[in-house]
């Protein structure tokens, strides 16, 4: 007989990170994971997905959300903003662009280019440092009143986009990213804690989704939905982690360390 077959196997050491047999999550475990989710998303007025301030955004005026969504899908080279030559004197002339774009805004041309430049810079910084896109066209706004009686504005749909510019003497172009549009899951979570179930965005036009949100908040008479459209940056990176935790909260996990951190003996 081969002597190697009779050698004893070395003992194994179990660690907290070893996988355990799957088990349905109990209510205490689920509540702990839900608390983690709440802290992760920062469900307070410091989050601009909850308390959006348009003063750093660019308002798009000449497209309905439905029309803009369709145009972004069709325009492979992107949609242009108005452009004015740098340092051109406009104090004695109407504020007319040197290149007429596809998208109208409410900003003077000089301020428009500065604001687009800041948005592009912030988006590039996140992309280079964290590999994240934070530039979105926000379609539709919920005007609502929070638990402290303060008014708030929250975007409803987020369409991932990119700002491109061939050179400083060319107009900015708005181009849609390949990722799908999403609803504001942070807002859905925030209002869900107050017993208001916002619908999830599915395969529908933006206007159809706005109507569904209006129906969901109809008992709150002072709340309203408007079809305003903005280009802005949103730090949306934590949503993926929130979704992973939601899977754990709903279905449990076989990861021993996670179960121990969540209070399981």
Image: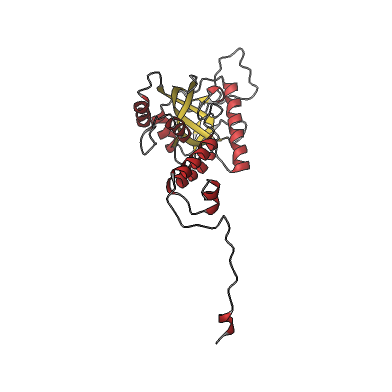
Corner quadrant of residue 188: top left
Colour setting? secondary structure
Picture layout, residue 190 above or below residue 255: above
Corner quadrant of residue 121: top right
Corner quadrant of residue 108: top right
The residue at the far front in this view is 265
Please tell me which residue lies in front, 244 or 77. 244
Side of 27 where 88 appears, left or right: right
Please tell me which residue lies in front, 192 or 135. 192
Please tell me which residue lies in front, 215 or 209. 215
The picture places residue 125, in percent across and down from the top left corner, at 62, 37
Picture layout, residue 4 above or below residue 31: below
The picture places residue 145, in percent across and down from the top left corner, at 46, 21
x 63%, y 20%: residue: 88
The residue at the far top in this view is 92
The picture places residue 136, in percent across and down from the top left corner, at 51, 33
Picture layout, residue 103 above or below residue 72: above
The picture places residue 218, in percent across and down from the top left corner, at 35, 23
x 58%, y 73%: residue: 9
The residue at the far right in this view is 87
Quadrant containing the N terminus is bottom right
x 37%, y 19%: residue: 221
- How many numbered discs, if any? 0
Please tell me which residue lies in front, 28 or 198. 28
């Amino acid at each position: 007989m081969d002597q190697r077959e009779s050698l004893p196997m070395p003992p194994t050491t179990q660690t907290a990170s070893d996988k355990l047999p799957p088990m349905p999550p109990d209510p205490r475990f689920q509540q702990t994971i839900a608390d983690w989710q709440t802290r992760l998303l920062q469900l307070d007025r410091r989050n601009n997905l909850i308390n959006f301030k348009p003063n750093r955004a660019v308002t798009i005026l000449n497209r309905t959300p439905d029309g803009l969504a369709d145009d972004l899908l069709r325009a492979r080279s992107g949609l242009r903003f108005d452009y004015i030559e740098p340092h051109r004197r406009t104090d004695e002339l109407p504020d007319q662009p040197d290149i007429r774009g596809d998208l109208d805004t409410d900003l003077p041309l000089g301020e428009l280019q500065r604001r687009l430049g800041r948005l592009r810079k912030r988006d590039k910084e996140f992309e280079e440092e964290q590999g994240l896109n934070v530039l979105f066209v926000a379609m539709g706004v919920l005007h609502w009143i929070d638990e402290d009686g303060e008014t708030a504005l929250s975007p409803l749909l987020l369409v991932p986009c990119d700002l491109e510019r061939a050179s400083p003497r060319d107009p900015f172009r708005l181009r849609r990213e390949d990722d799908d549009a999403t609803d504001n899951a942070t807002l859905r979570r925030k209002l869900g804690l107050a017993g208001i179930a916002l619908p999830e965005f599915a395969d529908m036009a933006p206007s159809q989704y706005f109507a569904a949100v209006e129906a969901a908040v109809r008992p709150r008479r002072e709340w309203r939905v408007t079809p305003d459209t903005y280009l802005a940056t949103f730090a949306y990176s934590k949503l993926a982690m929130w979704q992973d935790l939601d899977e754990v909260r709903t279905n449990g996990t076989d990861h021993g360390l996670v179960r121990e951190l969540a209070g399981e003996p």
